[in-house]
Image: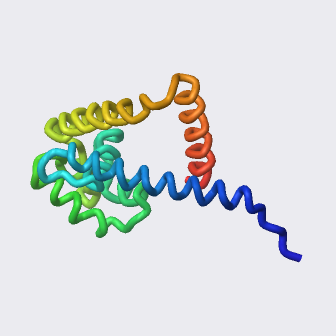
Amino acid sequence: MQPQSDPTSELIAERFHRAMTTTHRRLGSLIALKLDNGLTAPQCYILSMISNEQNMTVSRLADKMDVKPSAITVMLDRLVNNGYAARFHDSKDRRVVLVQCTDKGSEALLRIKADVEAMLKHHLRKLDMAEMEQFVQTFEKIAAELSKDD
C-alpha cells in the first residue's frame, strides 16, 4: 500500500519551489549586473571558494564543485588570464597544481559581496525585524538539512 500524499505539503512545496526559482533567477540577474567586467557568476563562485582556502589544489576545487578537474580548467584559465587567480605547482610535488586568489580577485570579491549585501538589504526591508529573523532562521534550517549530504 502506497502512503497517501498530503495535498497541503505538496502545495507548500510547490509554492516554495516557485518562490525559490523566481528569487534565484532574479537575484542571479541582478548580481550579474554587479560583477566585474569579464567575470561571470560561476567564475565568481569558483573565485570565492579559492579565496576561502588559499593554495587550493585544482582536484580539491573540482571535488568541492562535484565535477572533474578538466571541467574546471576552462573557467580557471579565464580567471588566471584576467588576473583574478594564479595557478602554480606545489613546491613539494610538481604534479600538484595549486590555485590562489590574487589581490585583484580579492578586491573584486569584496566589491561584489558589498553590492550583493546592499541589494539583499534593499529587498529584505519589506520585512520587519521579527519576520526577517524568522525567515533567516528557517532558511538556515533548510540549508543545514540540505548540507547533511555533503
Question: Which corner quadrant of the image does residue 59 belong to?
Answer: bottom left
Return the residue nearer the eye: 113 or 105.
113
Farthest residue to the bottom: give it: 1
On the rendered structure, is 8 left or right of 77?
A: right
Number of callouts: 0
x 24%, y 64%: residue: 73
Q: Is residue 21 visible?
A: yes
Residue 125 in the image: above or below residue 5: above
Residue 115 in the image: above or below residue 68: above
Colour approach in the figure: rainbow
In the image, residue 38 lies at what x, y percent? 13, 53
In the image, residue 98 lies at what x, y percent? 26, 51
On the rendered structure, is 50 left or right of 148?
A: left
On the rendered structure, is 2 left or right of 90?
A: right
x 56%, y 27%: residue: 133
x 60%, y 31%: residue: 134
Return the residue nearer the eye: 55 or 28.
28
Question: Which corner quadrant of the image does residue 36 belong to?
Answer: top left
x 39%, y 35%: residue: 123
Farthest residue to the right: give it: 1
Residue 95 in the image: above or below residue 90: below
On the rendered structure, is 125 left or right of 16?
A: left
Which image quarter is the N terminus in?
A: bottom right
Farthest residue to the front: give it: 126
Return the residue nearer the eye: 145 or 69.
145
Q: Is residue 92 visible?
A: no
Question: Which corner quadrant of the image does residue 22 belong to?
Answer: bottom left
